[in-house]
Image (tube, rainbow, N blue to C red):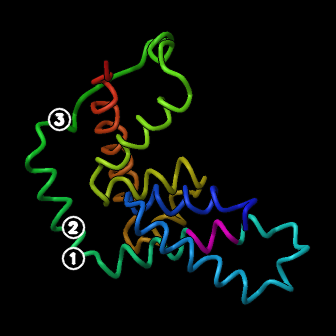
Amino acid sequence: MRKYQNMVFSTAARLTANDAQAEDIVQEVFLKAYERFDALRAAPAAPGWLRTVATNLSLNHLQRYRKRWRFFSEFTRESDDTSADAEWAAPDTFFDDMDNADRRAWVENALAKLPGHQRVPLVLFHFEDMPYEEIAKKLRVSIGKVKTDILRARRALADTLAKKPE
């Protein structure tokens, strides 16, 4: 558990954008792992199994609370003044004055600001290395919607990251 708890937590936290919900999901993942402890103990595929369970439980959680989640994400988005059409490329020296921990926290914070319908496919594609087809199947949407949401998420994330903290 100690060996994989950070991986499982980061998977759940990126998808839910809520540390408290991610902690609950991590507990559930490890309860399921405990139930299958004998099979997982020496299995080389245990880390992949844990990540898959964390991803599936996170997606289930998001779908279960989608109406409430969508309401709040749309409410937040309406009050933002960000442009989804922003184009931005970081210069090679952009992160030079930031250490890895600050950079990671800044990117995680920017990810959390994305609306869920954009954040989830972006995280699944870039952090979980899931192909478009599998994302579409898991989210029960078309491949075109997945690609559009990922493109819009990249633009919104770029716009958020363009506002470098002091």
Judge by depth and name the residue closer to the eye, 98 or 126. 98
- Residue displayed at 30% across by 78% down: 65
**Region rendered in magenta:** 50-54
Task: Judge from the rendering whether residue 69 lies leftward or rightward of residue 76; answer left or right.
Answer: right
Task: Judge from the rendering whether residue 154 lies leftward or rightward of residue 136; answer left or right.
Answer: left
Residue ID for mark 3: 83
Residue ID for mark 1: 67
**Disc 3 packing (10 Å; few <14; some 14–19; many ≥20):** few
Task: Judge from the rendering whether residue 8 lies leftward or rightward of residue 62; answer left or right.
Answer: right
- Residue displayed at 29% across by 25% down: 87
- Residue displayed at 47% across by 66% down: 22
Residue type (three-letter) at the residue carrying disc 1? Lys
Residue 62 image-quadrant placement: bottom left
Chief secondary structure of the magenta span?
helix
Mark nearest the camera among 2 and 3 is 2
Q: Is 76 rendered above or below residue 40?
A: above
Q: Position of residue 106 (x, y in %)?
A: 41, 34
Judge by depth and name the residue closer to the eye, 126 or 110. 110
- Residue displayed at 11% across by 58% down: 75
Q: Secondary structure at mark 3?
A: loop
User: Which comes sooner in the sequence, label 3 or label 1?
Assistant: 1
Residue 58 inside the magenta-drawn segment = no
Q: Is 126 rendered above or below residue 20?
A: above
Residue ID for mark 2: 70
Q: Are marks 1 and 2 in contact (CB under 8 Å)?
A: yes
Residue type (three-letter) at the residue carrying disc 3? Ser
